Each structure stands twice: as C-alpha cells, then as structure tokens.
Image (cartoon, rainbow, N blue to C red):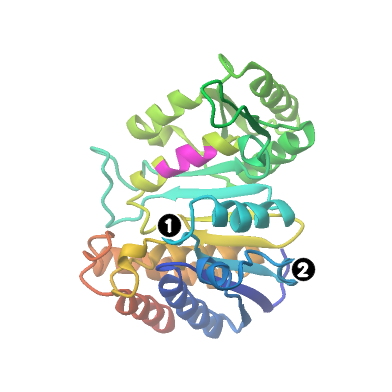
Amino acid sequence: MTDKSNFSIAVIPGDGTGPEVVREALKALEAAGVREHLRLDFHHYDLGGERYLKTGEILPEGVIAELGKMDAILLGAIGHPDVKPGILEKGLLLELRFRLDMYINLRPVVLFPGVETPLKNKGPEDIDFVVVRENTEGLYTGGGGFLRKGTPQEVAIQESINTRYGVERCLRYAFDFCRKRKKRMKLTLCGKTNVLTYASDLWERVFRLLQEEYPEVRTDYANVDAVCMWMIKNPEWFDVIVTDNLFGDIITDIGAIIQGGLGIAAGGNINPQGVSMFEPIGGSAPKYTGKNVINPLAAIMAASMMLEHLGASAAAKRIENAVKKAVLRDIKNLAAGNMGMGTVEAGDLIADYIARD
C-alpha cells in the first residue's frame, strides 16, 4: 500500500477465546514493530456478544465511521453462546464486510514444515496455494424471504445475487494477485456451470474476457465438487483459486484442515482501496475460554497478513518466520490443549523469536 511507518490499527477482540488470541497477536505485532521501527497505534473496540447483551448494540454507526478511518482492523472471533446464531454474524461480520466494501476474502493455504496434514504423502511442497473468495455478493447478501412461514405450505427463498461489477473486480483482483505471487502463474475458476447456469455463466464469461489481458497467467476451470476432491487428492495442482462467496466459504475450511487445522489458518477481508480486516479462521471456541489452551498462531498469522497488506513486508516476514520456527522446533500439535504449552506461553515464544532473530 504505502511505505509509511505509522499505522492506526482497530482491534476487535470479540467473543470467547478471541481476546486471548488477539492478546498474543498484539505481542507479535509490538515485537515486529520494534524490530522494523514501526509505530502501531492500537484502538480497541468492545464489539461482540457481551456488548450486545448489555446494550442491544451490535455495530453503531459512529463505530463504523471510526473503523473506516483506520489503516486496518484486527479481529479475534465473533460468536457468543447466549446470542442466537446469525445475529452477530450478520449484524457485525457481514455488516462490516458490506459497509466497508471488503469485497475480497483472501485465504492463504500453506503447510509449514513441522506441521502435520491429514493428507497421506503430502508435504509443504504440495500445499501452497491461495483462495480468492468474492466477499460481498452471492447468497450472503440476504436476498429472499419467506412465504406462508410457519404453515405446511411454507416457502423459503434464498437468492444468489451476482453483479457484473462485483464479479469483474473480484476476478481482476485474482488475476493481479496471481501475477504478483509469481509462483505457478495459474488461476483456477471454481464454480458450478452444469447446474447454476446463470451465475456461473456470468463468472465464466468475465473470466475468459479478462484472461486476454493476462496472457502470462494460465487458466483453468473446475466445478466446486471437483475442487473439493482435488484439494484433498492433489493439492499441488493449485496456485490461486478464485470463486464466489458460498463456494469460497466451503473450500477454505477444507484448506484450513489440510494446512494443519484452524489453529494456524488466517484470512483477510480486503478492500484494496480502503480499510481491510484480518482474522483467524477459527470461531470463538467458548468451551476453551479462559483456560489458556487455545492456539494463538492463527491470530498471529492474521497479524502478519495485515502487516504485509499495509506494506510492512519485513515486519510481516519476521512474524511468519517466528511461527515457522515455533511449529518446527517447539509446538508439535496445533490442537487446543495439546500444544505442549499454553496460549500465553505460545505467544511469548513467538514474540521472543521475533525479538531475538
């Protein structure tokens, strides 16, 4: 983005174990900031289940305005056991994506040396790709409704809304990302052309048109069910995958598992022209709250992604290298309670690696 060294970061710890993992991510950010002479100003927001239960507020207008002025947002987790599912997810997570136009969900799927994958005979050289998911359209827009709700004749309609504008900007981002990534230079469109004919036709037509502008990028297409299969059987086939909102939501969870689990999977909600938000992929995991057992590495990797997005690549790399050393030398199991150390100790370990190496 820029070469500046001062950044204003909004911090939303959220619910459950979110505050615990964010605390450790902030340690890593502070340590990397010291090493690379960055000034990181953290602005904390108490958005989430507790605030909603106390005040009825989910995302006040004034807070949205403040968040829009930040350089980036670091999110912990959203989801409270005493709040009906969907209220916080729609009112906070989706609302932030829509209102701040975070139209790209970026999910690196990378297996670090020392981390186990459930895939037989696959290693770090095989699992290294990125999913670019459209983040503000499709089935997640809330289009549709009920007819005769609560009766035997009830009808539920959920509409997938895809605009040429939204599809094209997502695809163009994916082409640009693939070119900038400079690995296999291959972009795979994931859809369902044999059934979802209207939306898939729009995606595929725009994909083919843009392909002419990026002759150095090889392209191919696969139905989403085939992508799920090949991610498990031959993940080395993929470099960058671009897909719609729903399919992206599904295949990125497969990606998380094959890279070692939710304990290390991070993602970004990207607005290339505005503020972007970074988060661990795992949920709030309320059953582990306050037990000092949750794995903070995903949140720490989200912090690394955030710095990379902000242009602080050297600091981002310091965090990533520290995580790589920790999983190779010290943390042999990424599951909560099985790391061989607590949440705080794991965070201290990463911060210490950053400070010393």
Q: Is 197 in the magenta?
A: no
Q: Residue at x 36, y 41 (%)?
A: 126
Name the residue nearer the viewer: 117 or 51: 51
**Residue type pointed to by label 1:** Gly
Task: Please state the extent of the stretch shown in magenta in the rendering.
Answer: 248-253
Q: Residue at x 34, y 33 (%)?
A: 232
Could you give the CA–CA distance between mark 1 and mark 2, rounded to whole angstroms? 26 Å
Residue at (57%, 49%) from the top-left corner? 106
Q: Quadrant of the C terminus?
A: bottom left
> Where is mark 2, residue-wise?
65
Quarter-of-image position of residue 332: bottom left
Q: Which residue position is annotated with label 1?
A: 283
The label shown at residue 333 is none
Residue 258 versus residue 143: which sits nearer the camera?
Answer: 143
Q: Return the x and y of residue 227 as percentages of the image width and height.
A: 45, 28
**Residue 331 image-quadrant placement:** bottom left
Q: Considering only vertical position in the picture, is 44 above or below 230?
A: below
- Whether residue 12 is visible to the viewer of this picture, yes or no, is yes
